[in-house]
Image: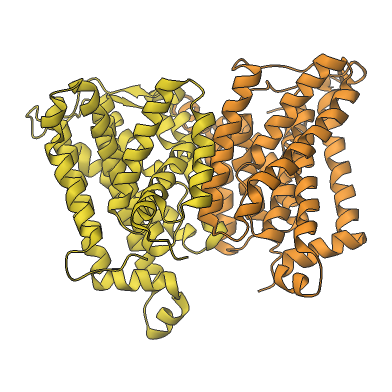
Amino acid sequence: MSTSLLIVQILNGLQLGVLLFLIAAGLTLVFGVMDFINLAHGVQYMLGAYLAVMFYSLTGSFLAALILALLATLAFGLLLEFVVFRHLYDRDHLDQVIATFGVILFLNQGVKFVWGAAPLSLPIPEFFSGSVVLMPGLLYPVWRLVIIGSGFAVALILYLLVSRTRVGMLVRAGATNAAMVSALGVNIRRLFMIVFGFGTMLAGFAGIMIAPILSVEPGMGDTILILAFVVIVIGGIGSIRGALIAALLIGLVDTLGRSFAVDLLRLFMAPSPARTVGPAIASMLIYLLMAVVLYIRPSGLFPAKGR
Amino acid sequence: MAALPKRLSTGDAIAITVFAVLAIFPLLAKFGTEGYLLALVTRVMIFAIAAIALDLIVGFGALVSFGHAAFVGLGAYAVGILASHGITDALVALPAALLVSALFAFVTGLVCLRTKGVYFIMITLAFGQMAFFTASSLAPYGGDDGLTVRMRDTVAGLPLLRSDGALYYVAFVCLLATFALCRALIVSRFGRVFRGARENPMRLAAIGFDVFRYQLAAYVIAGALAGMSGFLLANATNFVSPAYMSWQRSGELIIMVVLGGMGTLYGAIIGAAAFLFAEEWLSELTEHWKMIFGPLLIIVVVFARGGLIGLVFGRGRHD
């Protein structure tokens, strides 16, 4: 394994990490504040990608598509909240799981119905296309760097919002003890609408940013959703900081594991079993990491709930 | 929670009716498009086994496992992998299926059961995904594509499972055994502790019960029973695939349990039937059947809190 390959894979890992963070951030706050388990968060990501493709073909401009798709995901998320989720806050987690599972079934099929089952693609914006030379002999696509950069920018904005503004303070308080915040006269439902809308937009943003390098297809949100769950479980439910650290950790471990597991195993195994076992171990790695973290700390690394 | 009766209650009456109908169904099916219906009901019973096992831990222990399909898949893979090595006897494959899934339940249970509530849901989900991705990357056993099991297992060398009718009754007996076992467990001392742990684990611990061990035992039993359903599934479909372990499958199992009425055991059978028949019927209607089924689920959750049984008999679920 060469140094340049290692650097490329670390960058890829960071890129997966920030993507996971964008999705996990909304999920963990919705969880933390409303104790609401939203399986349908992944379809918001998918929807963001589809809407970006649609608006791009209508306007021909990536920026316009980005803005329109963000607004559309926000509107759609609030619509979902109004029509479905609102009736589920007082229910137990099982009901929430099933109802939001129903939303997933509907929307995964819905995008097939509207846009067809074939994967769609979105071109990389002209300005950011191509690659840059990071080191002699090491080329890296600009767009991936843009994703990493925008992910960290969002993390910074989120940090400032949560730690420096009044709404952020309420969100933190809500994640620690929602009932108390409500008793102090804060309209927790409205606060939740804000958090939910914001989380939806972040997931949509992740979908839009990743659309140029992944194929946009039905069900694309499901895999990433479960990774996001792993992230918030490791990070601690309700904690933005935990989500960021866990997301980067998962992104790096998963990416590096997949690219180097076979090589590492070959150090002490014959090549042919290493090629068989390697991918299996690589795909288990993040779950093993989660198991270890939860075994040591059953409520994650940075639990927000004061108990 | 379901009241546990001394005399014949509505619940027992329903359970007896369900099993009576299943017992004579092959005779009735003779009049229709026999093979198709027989296969469908066999499938219902196979999934009902896994759903009952899930109801045991969800309905009576409030352990919402979102990775239950992994056990089904492991049982199925035990059959498939053994068959690909030339071992095709149920006397080997069934114990292997039970053992593998019980072992997986034991190891993951050690971690999962340390957590509660949402964490438990998500960690079981994650372990389910782990099993799914591991199966997908098992290149020697078909990887993503899964593997075909050429022939159904023999039983002690005899081709007992080869006919569809025989497989039907084997599945029936397995279902009946699963139901009887789970019902006996729930009314036993073990079951009381397990149910008590749902209501107030701290109080139980104070009386001197090691709640964790009871929950782990129930989790392992539920896993092994799901493994049995996987064994039957592999034999019924002659095919094993990672898709058996997908998280959607786990979700479907939960839906079956809740649809039929949680914490009743027989409800899981009704739920499995309702789900699979609805799937069959709606998918004939339109290829976009999930666009109907999804909203249907939401409506059931929002309006019918006791599942279908609760809807009919007017008994709501207590949380």
Chain seen in yellow: B
Image position, residue B42 (x, y; %) = 23, 33
Nearest to the observer: residue A159 or residue B63: B63
Instruction: Name the foreground residue: B72 vs A62.
Output: A62
Residue most toward the bottom? Answer: B207
**Drawing shade for chain A:** orange
- Side (left or right) of B227 relative to B138: left
Identity of the residue drawn at 52% across and 36% down: B294
Quarter of the figure with the C terminus of chain A = bottom right
Quarter holding the N terminus of chain A is top right
Is residue A143 left or right of B54 when viewed as pictured? right
Q: Which residue occupies the foreground of this view, B249 or A189?
A: A189
Residue for point 65% across, 35% down: A43
Please provide percent x and percent y for residue B273: 31, 39
Which is nearer the eye, A305 or B89? A305
When asked about the image quadrant of residue B77, the answer is: top left
Residue A190 in picture, x, y percent from top left? 79, 57
| Horizontal and vertical percent position of residue B283 | 42, 24
- Point 54% across, 44% down: residue: B298
Question: Which residue is painted at 52% across and 53% down in the image?
Answer: A95
The relative height of residue B68 versus residue A237 in the rendered view (above or below) is above
Quadrant in the picture for residue A166:
bottom right
Let me know if residue B91 appears in the view.
no
